[in-house]
Image: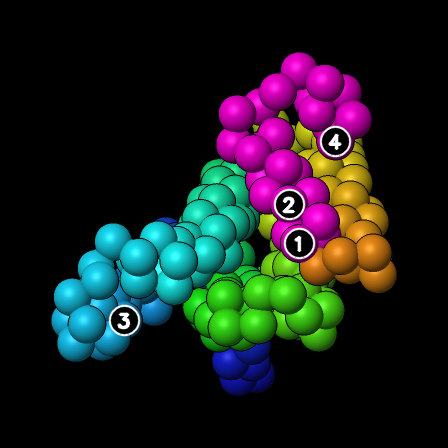
Amino acid sequence: MPTPYSTIAGQSVERLAALSDGVFAIAMTLLVLDLRVPAAAALHGDLFRHVFVVLGPRFVPYLLSFMTLGIFWIAQQTQLNHFARSDRTLTWIQLGFLLAVTLIPFSTTLLAEYLGYRLPVVAYWINLVLLGGALFASVRYADRAGLLKDVVTPELRATHERRIVRFQIMYALGVALCIVSSYLSIAFLILLQLCSVFDLRFARRLLG
C-alpha cells in the first residue's frame, strides 16, 4: 500500500526554524526602510525641523513593531524548542503565523501614516490577533498530535497558552482605548510590549 504524502511532508522542525528566522529578519529590515528622510529637508535645508517633526513620529510605530516582532520571535522559538518533530498540518499553521509576520511592515506603515486615526490601530490589532491565534493553534495542535517533547508537561504547555491568551486580552483592551484616543491606545500597546521585553515583576504576575 503506497505511503500517503501527507504522512511524510513537513516533518523538519530545523527547516521550519530556519525559514522563520529569515522571514523575521526580512520583516524587521522592512520596518526601518520606512524611516526615510523627507525630501523637503534637502530642498529647504531645515533638516532639524523635518527630522524631528515629520520623521520623529514615525519612530513610534517602528519601535512598537520591532518590539512586537521580537516578542513573537521569542514566543515561536520557545514553541519550536518544545516540538519533537513537525508534520504537514503543524507546518502550515506555522506558515500561517509567518504570513501574519510579513503583514507587520504593512500595518506599521498604515499606523505611521495615519497615527491619529482609529482604523489603523484596529488593523494593527488584527495583525496581533493573527499572530497570537496562530501560535495558540500551533501549540494546541502539537499537543493533540503528540508532537511535543516528553519534557513538555501539561503545566508547561498551559503556561504558554495562558500567556498568549492574557496578552491577547490586554491587546484588545488597549485597542478599545482608541475610542477615547488613538494615541492613548498606541501608548498602552507600547507599555505592554515594554513589560514583556523587560519582564517587569508586576507584569509577570498579570500576564503570566
Q: In this view, does 168 lie above or below 54?
A: above
Q: Which amino acid does label 1 sit on?
A: Tyr
Q: What residue type is labelled 2?
A: Ala
The numbered disc on residue 187 is 2
Tell me, yes or no, if residue 167 can be seen here: yes
Residue 9 at x, y percent in the picture: 48, 72
* Residue denoted by label 4: 207
Q: Is the magenta stretch mostly helix, strand or loop?
A: helix
Residue 74 at x, y percent in the picture: 49, 41
The numbered disc on residue 183 is 1
* Residue denoted by label 3: 38
Q: In this view, does 120 lie above or below 62?
A: below
The Cα atoms of the two marked residues, 3 and 2, are separated by 25 Å
Residue drawn at x 50%, y 73% as measured from the top left:
113
- Colour setup of the view: rainbow
The Cα atoms of the two marked residues, 4 and 2, are separated by 18 Å
* Magenta residue span: 183-208
Q: Which amino acid does label 3 sit on?
A: Pro
Q: In this view, does 22 lie above or below 117?
A: above
The Cα atoms of the two marked residues, 4 and 1, are separated by 23 Å
Nearer to me, 62 or 161? 62
Residue 157 at x, y percent in the picture: 71, 36
